[in-house]
Image (cartoon, rainbow, N blue to C red):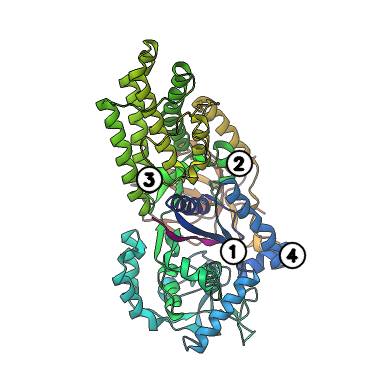
Amino acid sequence: MSGSFYVTTPIYYVNDVPHIGHAYTTIAADVMARYKRMRGFEVMFATGTDEHGQKIQQAADARGVTAQELVDQVVVNFKKLWEKLDVTNTDFVRTTEPRHQQVVQYIFSRLMEKGDIYKGSYEGWYCVPCETYFPESQIGEGRSCPDCGRPLQNMTEESYFFRMSKYEKPLLDYYEKNPGAILPQSRFNEVLSFIRSGLKDQSISRTSVSWGVPLPGDERHVIYVWFDALINYLTVAGYPDNTDSMSKFWPSVNHIMAKDIIRFHCIIWPAMLLALGLTPPARVFSHGWWTVEGEKMSKSRGNVVDPFEMVELYGADAFRYFLLREIPFGSDGDFSERALVGRINSDLANDLGNLLNRTLQMINNFTGGMIPSPASNPSPLDLEIEGLARSTLKTYLEKMDVYAFDEALKEVWNLIRRGNKYIDETMPWKLGKDNDRERLDPVLFSLCEVIRFSAAMLAPFMPGTACRIFEQTGLGDDPSRLSLEGLKWGGIPEGCVVNKKGVLFPRIDLKEWEKEKTERDAKRSATPDPGDHEEEIAIEDFKKIELRIARVVKVEPVPKADKLYKMDLDLGYERRTIVSGIREFRSPEELEGRQIVVICNLKPASLRGVTSNGMLLAAETPDGKSLALLTVDQEIAPGSRIH
Ligand SMILES: [Zn+2]
């Protein structure tokens, strides 16, 4: 097989701190890029950063630097991470680069000439921090932002519109002819039903924002960040001037992303492409979200997984392996460091590491370090393992082609485990002692073939490990340069000398790990993440928060809610009820009679049918396992105000 393959990650919002979600998408794209190279494809692999918009401007203002200075500083975080994770992107595009801005302006002008962009006015409920208008149907009575909860403003502005309604029918036609264009299938159905519900023209410019690509011919406007950002894929492919590159790579473009942005990629983006007379993406694959230890990942919980730290602690390969092995690509999953350590010990140290170690050890002991020649009359067991290696490779290729990474890895592990069992069955140490070379040689040869096949199939996932396996087995060359199709049983060159060096994945001692992890968590909770700090407020803002001392009178569990208490409080001037999520941490007896700190003027909220009129204050450790309640250092009249 040969041809061209173009794979992309979304361009990431540059002011974010890179987290596990970014790492996941990019590693998956890298695995695909490496895999396609090993199948003979010429690969273009792009990632980059989205650097425009109001939020960047605001962040820059807050730090007293220009927007350009800010993005130049923070883009480094992403570039560094991709290096640490062994990501082989062929391009890194930034939306502030002139090459990109030119393409955006060119596309805008072309669609304007064609009548697919027109000037109108936009009215709606707008959230400034989120830079988004929300339709009436998405906002509640409070007119607050469904994403961040801040108040929305009713705004009208002159805006340019992309005539998306015109592409409703062509999009449906395209997807009906190309049902594999969106994976997994569930997302395909979701997108289609959304298109069928009717497409509206999209506002694609802003006058309220200044940090963006200036709109050609009307400089009061900048081009809306989404319109700008999506075009990056064409910038990298060389649109419009590099027609060679476009005709080679555009028809094979595969966009990989998290599921929250598929509407942009499966509706707006292909409509823009159709308007330009280009084919929509060959494939959009959207993957799921990660929770951390069963909880939603958030800065305020302090449970954001730092990929830099994971690489530092466990190495890029183990982290890469874990993310793609742990859950089906496309489903949601849970990240836990304990599970990662578990996989390192069982899959990597035990299964893979042992197979390599035992084999190399026996070759050193019995054949003077040389991989022996294949058998002229193999035993049924030899033939069986040979057959398994061939069928594993075949299934692996099928799974990889449809992004079923976890299943591809399961296949490889099935072969690795069979290899270990084959050692137990053939007992080469006994054959060695008896000097039965006629039987011993084919066994050792078969084991080396199992190792070679496994390392080649693992190379897209664990490039460093695959290299070390080849080095230690004396197979030479970087396995990433092999052709997966060209992998043939019996293909080990003659005269390979093994070179056993160190252990691939040392076992992690769980007791020591536990201790180290506890210390690490404690240290983290003591050092606040800079991202944890809220923006500065004035004393007037603080005065709006009515904090008072309350005495806990009675505490009862809320039925059917494991974490909630209903708490009756005495405020001196009144009694009131609050609902609090501290049931895991304190018994009713530990709470009743205590004086606590309560926010009294919080909007009432209904939790599991109980109305909560306020909130108590407490501090939680990052792992969520322990909590400290705010209280006072001497008794004071309930209802006393806190200043
Ligand atoms: Zn908002």
Choose mark 1 or mark 2, whichever is in front.
Answer: 1
Label 4 sits on residue: 65
Task: Give the SS element for disc 3.
Answer: helix
Residue 419, image x and y in percent?
A: 35, 29
Say which label, 1 or 3, has the lower sequence index.
1
Choose mark 2 or mark 3, whichever is in front.
Answer: 3
Bounds of the magenta span? 1-12
* Vertical side of 446 occupied by 410: above or below: below
Task: Name which residue type carries label 2.
Answer: Ser
Label 3 sits on residue: 406
Task: Give the SS element for disc 4.
Answer: loop
Residue 256, image x and y in percent?
A: 45, 59
Task: Give the SS element for disc 1.
Answer: strand
Mark 1 to mark 2 CA distance (whole Å): 36 Å
Magenta stretch holds residue 41: no
Task: Name which residue type carries label 1.
Answer: Val
Choose mark 1 or mark 4, whichever is in front.
Answer: 1
Q: Main secondary structure of the magenta part?
A: strand
Residue at 37% in and 50% down: 400
Label 2 sits on residue: 525
In the rendered image, the quadrant that contains the C terminus is bottom right
Say which label, 1 or 2, has the lower sequence index.
1
Say which label, 1 or 4, has the lower sequence index.
4
Task: Name which residue type carries label 4.
Answer: Val
Residue 259, image x and y in percent?
A: 42, 60
Q: Is residue 421 visible?
A: yes
